[in-house]
Amino acid sequence: MAQDEKTRTTVEIHNKTYTIIGNEPKNHVQLVASLVDQKMKEIQESNRQLDTVRLAVLTAVNTMNDYLKLKADYASLIGSIKKKEDK
């Protein structure tokens, strides 16, 4: 697929259907949507009173927190590798 070619992928997140248009392959978009849906279900299990908007925001905050932790771990790992290479 050419880089500027857009794909249209229909996914379901939190019992709602969304059409995602982008450059990523369909299977990647489906995986991302599945992980978002899974995270929303996980958060909703312990916070049943949350409305959809608050649930979505809390899911985004949790996901960004996970991302930043992984990014820091990655930077630390790269730093460790560079130190070993410099020896």
Image (cartoon, helix red, strand yellow):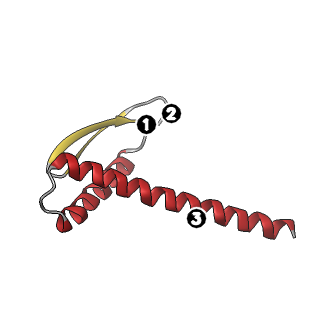
- Residue labelled with disc 1: 23
Mark 1 residue crowding within 10 angstroms, few (<14) / some (14–19) / many (20+): some
Residue 42 percent location from the top left of the image? 24, 65
Residue 65 percent location from the top left of the image? 43, 57
Tell me which amino acid carries mark 1: Asn
Residue 55 percent location from the top left of the image? 22, 53
Q: Real-space Cα distance between discs 2 and 1?
A: 7 Å
Mark 2 or mark 1: name the one nearer the start of the chain: 2
Q: In the picture, which quadrant includes the C terminus?
A: bottom right
Residue drawn at x 50%, y 56% as measured from the top left: 68
Label ID, residue 84: none
Mark 2 vs 3: CB contact within 8 A: no
Mark 3 vs 1: CB contact within 8 A: no
In the rendered view, does 22 fall on the left or right side of 48? right
Residue drawn at x 24%, y 58% as measured from the top left: 40
Tell me which amino acid carries mark 2: Gln
Q: Quadrant of residue 8?
A: top left
